[in-house]
Amino acid sequence: MGAVFMTDRGKIRQHNEDSGGVFVNPHGHRLAIVADGMGGHRAGDVASAMAIKKLQGYWENGDELTSPDAASVWLTEHVSKVNDELFVYSNEHEECKGMGTTLVAAICTSTFCTIGHIGDSRCYLLNEYGFNQITEDHSLVNELVKNGQISREDAEHHPRKNILVRALGTEKQVTLDVKSMEIEQEDVLLLCSDGLSNKVSEEQLKQILLTDLTLEQKGSHLIDLANELGGEDNITLALVDFISESR
């Protein structure tokens, strides 16, 4: 199993409010995370960094997860803890009131992956069946699509595309969407913030992941392309494949 994490400020923003990483627990399993912070005076970077640091600590001191059910329970319980901590922090620090973050996280083992997410950071899976988005955005625009009020094509350029209906840390309780899937040896997971998915089409994402480049080169190519196409937002991604040597 191979994994890389990359983040870039983009061409316009003065600060990078994204955070993330790929972390290994004592049992050799990986937790890949991407978080896109928001709210307050530079509080977005506080929210995303806090979420990542807390989850990293829980993960690196955690028990072995031998089944998708155990992984689902772990994600749900620990993301709930992080939500509590962010919510309390934001209410105790005036400059951080209203802060929050998206979160997409993948627990990766040699046989299964468990994905949890809140917000509009995404997870995609490339496998023998093609390239597909695994998560569903918790956004106002996606609610309009589901209700049949606008088309998916309209959603791509909707002026309120950035409005979330669910985020980590903004309310006392939050629901994490969780799903698990079996993994084959040559599958590839892409986790990313909307700074990538808003600029680079699914077809472009797929074609880059299908190249013979290394994971690092694929990640760099994706970030470079998002910047070439405007780079208006921070750009963050994690890539996990199930064929590379462990690193």
Image (cartoon, rainbow, N blue to C red):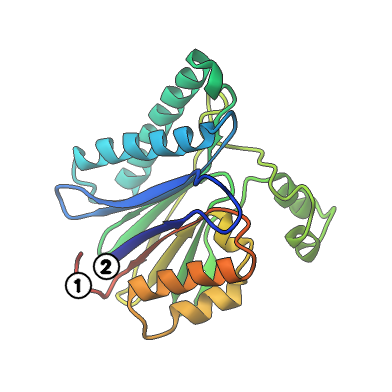
Q: Residue at x 52, y 44 (%)?
A: 15
Residue nearest the observer in this picture, 58 or 149: 58
Residue 119: which quarter of the image?
Answer: top right
According to the picture, the residue beneath numbered tag 2 turns out to be 2
Looking at the image, do the residues carrying marks 1 and 2 touch, with CB atoms under 8 Å apart? yes
For residue 182, side relative to residue 150 (left or right): left
Disc 1 crowd rating (10 Å Cα; few below 14, some 14-19, many 20+) is few
Horizontal and vertical percent position of residue 28? 17, 55
Task: Evaluate whether residue 103 shows in this view.
Answer: no
Decide: few, some or many residues near mark 2? Use Cα within 10 Å; few <14, some 14-19, many ≥20.
some
Which amino acid, by three-letter code, is at mark 2? Answer: Gly
Please provide percent x and percent y for residue 186.
Answer: 33, 77
Which is nearer the eye, 152 or 111? 152
Direction from residue 142 to residue 25 in the image, left or right = left
Where is residue 109? Give x, y as percent.
Answer: 26, 59
Residue at the outermost top position: 92
Please state which amino acid type lies under the numbered disc 1.
Glu
- The residue positioned 79% from the left and 51% from the top of the image is 159
Q: Is residue 123 left or right of residue 183?
A: right
Position of the C terminus by quadrant? bottom left
Query: Is label 1 in a helix, a strand or a loop?
Result: loop
Q: CA distance from mark 1 to mark 2?
A: 6 Å
Q: Which residue is mark 1?
A: 245
Q: Is residue 84 left or right of residue 64?
A: right
